[in-house]
Image: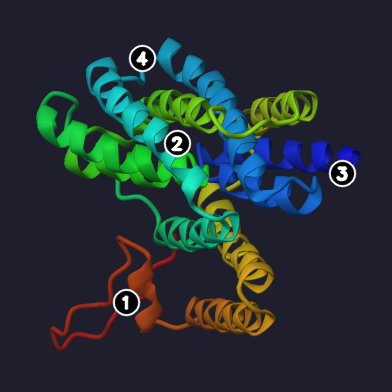
Amino acid sequence: MIALTIGLAVFVGIALGLLGGGGSILTVPLLAYVAGMDAKQAIATSLLVVGATSAIGAISHARAGRVQWRTGLIFGAAGMAGAYAGGILARYIPGTVLLIGFAVMMIATAIAMLRGRRNAETSEGEHRLPIPKIIAEGLVVGLVTGLVGAGGGFLVVPALALLGGLPMPLAVGTSLIVIAMKSFAGLAGYLTSVHINWTLALAVTTAAVLGALIGSRLTALINPDALRKTFGWFVLAMSSVILAQEIHPAVGITAAALTATAAGLHLACTRKNICPLRRLTPGRREPAATGQPATHTTS
């Protein structure tokens, strides 16, 4: 099982390298259900994995000038405070409740990945997020990170791109700085009450970092939009497994059936000119009712 865990950690890292985030959402289920860790050990270890892989990814972005240090450091500092508090607060919350919360985070992450990211067209300096708002959002996102072990990139990137007005490449690079800072702070909070297997944790972290480096080299070979959507459906399916394990099999089966139905409808709608499910994807709108026949364009 240890060999399988390390092998799957490489896959998680590849997903991180390809998508610039999102792969960490699989780390907790991997550690809990494959490596056999209890919920709090799995979350604490995942924070180490997420922090290390994000830090490695941030280095390449920083070298390319895709990090806004002012916003990243302020957001990250607030996120560290929230994550540390979340890590300490987690000692008073049952592991089952934390895993159910993590499943909810997986569902939210999957929806965000299926919706996609809007490109911010503003320049770096045109809109500057006010410091109080940066701190408030950092505290909230950090608290979530500390509690359930998710890096929160799907929350940080939209905050930086849509509210902060950063172009997407800058938002992604800056978010990695934030994620690394608050993941390590959340880990510090957990270590006040949780002991982790450092040998296994470092092995999984090394495998994930290696996968991230591989994934970053594969980005030119794979359609990132198609990969992101496929990964989103996979994360939704994984969330149903956790719900089945932690609540009741019927809940997991219902969630899996809903996921399969939604995926089927989405696939069917890609072959239609008019479909309500296209509202899930920003930038793809139905033709306006102008009385003229709609034209079909291909991308």
Badge number at residue 4: 3
Q: Earlier in the sequence, mark 1 or mark 4?
A: 4
Q: Earlier in the sequence, mark 1 or mark 3?
A: 3
Q: Nearer the viewer, mark 2 or mark 4?
A: 2
Quadrant for the C terminus in the image: bottom left
- For mark 2, give the secondary structure: helix
Q: Earlier in the sequence, mark 2 or mark 3?
A: 3
Residue at 18 percent of width and 79 percent of height: 288
Seen in the picture, residue 10 relative to 242 is either above or below; the reply is above
Kind of residue at badge 1 = Thr
Q: Which residue is mark 2?
A: 88
Residue 210, quarter of picture: top right
From the viewer's perspective, tell me whether residue 40 is left or right of residue 276.
right
Q: Earlier in the sequence, mark 2 or mark 4?
A: 4
From the viewer's perspective, tell me whether residue 85 is left or right of residue 204.
left
Kind of residue at badge 3 = Leu
Q: Which residue is mark 1?
A: 295
